Image (cartoon, rainbow, N blue to C red):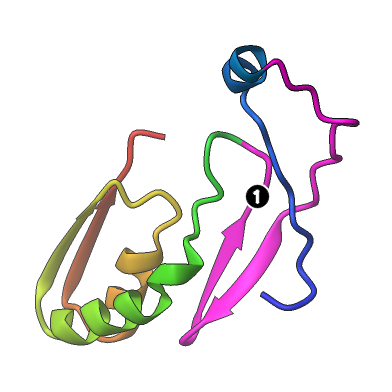
C-alpha cells in the first residue's frame, strides 16, 4: 500500500546460519488499517510470524466472496480473516473462520 513502511525481519535461525546481523533492529510500526473492497482489516507488522494480510490475494478474496454469495463458508487458516470477511461482506449466508493463532 502506498506510503506504508517496509519492514524486513530476519529470523534468528537464519541470522546464525548465514552469519548475518542487521545493522539495527527496526522499530515495529503501529497497527495499520487496510480498506479492501468495503472491508476493513487491521494488520500488525512485526508482531507474530506473519502480518495476517497478503496483498497478492486481493483479487482472490473478491472472487471467492462473489462465489460464496448465499452459501455457507468455512475459512480455515483464516489468520486475519480476509477471505471470511470478504465472503460475509458479499452476502454469504453463514461464515465460520478458524485459525491456530
Q: Residue furthest right?
A: 24
Residue at image location 31% in from the left, 65% down from the top: 84
Residue extending farthest front: 18
23 is higher (above) or lower (below) than 73: above
* Camera-nearest residue between 13 and 26: 13
How crowded pointer 1 is (Cα within 10 Å; few <14, some 14-19, many 20+) is rated as some
Residue 52 at x, y = what percent?
49, 52
Q: From the viewer's perspective, is 27 left or right of 2?
A: right
Q: Is residue 99 left or right of residue 11?
A: left
Locate the C terminus by quadrant. top left
Instruction: Identify the residue shown where x is 22% and y is 65%.
Output: 95
**Relative to 96, residue 13 above or below:** above
25 falls in the magenta region: yes
Q: Quadrant of residue 59?
A: bottom left
Residue 79, image x and y in percent?
Answer: 40, 49
Q: Which stretch is magenta?
A: 19-47
Mark 1 lies on residue: 44
Residue 4 image offset from top left, x and y in percent: 76, 67
**Image quadrant in which you'd find residue 87:** bottom left
- Dominant secondary-structure state across the stretch colored magenta: loop
Is residue 31 magenta-colored? yes
**Considering only vertical position in the picture, is 68 above or below 50?**
below
Q: Is residue 8 above or below residue 71?
A: above
Q: Secondary structure at mark 1?
A: loop
Q: Quadrant of the N terminus?
A: bottom right
Residue at figure coordinates x 11%, y 69% from the top left? 72
State the residue at coordinates (79%, 22%): 21
Asked if residue 49 lies left or right of residue 28, the reply is left
The tally of labels here is 1
Amino acid at each position: 500500500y502506498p506510503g506504508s513502511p517496509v519492514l524486513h525481519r530476519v529470523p534468528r535461525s537464519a541470522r546464525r546460519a548465514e552469519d548475518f546481523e542487521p545493522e539495527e533492529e527496526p522499530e515495529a510500526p503501529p497497527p495499520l488499517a487496510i480498506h479492501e473492497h468495503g472491508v476493513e482489516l487491521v494488520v500488525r507488522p512485526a508482531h507474530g510470524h506473519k502480518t495476517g494480510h497478503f496483498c497478492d490475494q486481493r483479487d482472490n478474496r473478491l472472487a471467492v466472496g462473489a462465489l460464496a454469495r448465499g452459501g455457507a463458508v468455512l475459512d480455515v487458516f483464516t489468520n486475519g480473516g480476509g477471505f471470511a470477511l470478504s465472503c460475509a461482506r458479499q452476502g454469504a449466508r453463514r461464515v465460520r473462520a478458524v485459525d491456530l493463532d
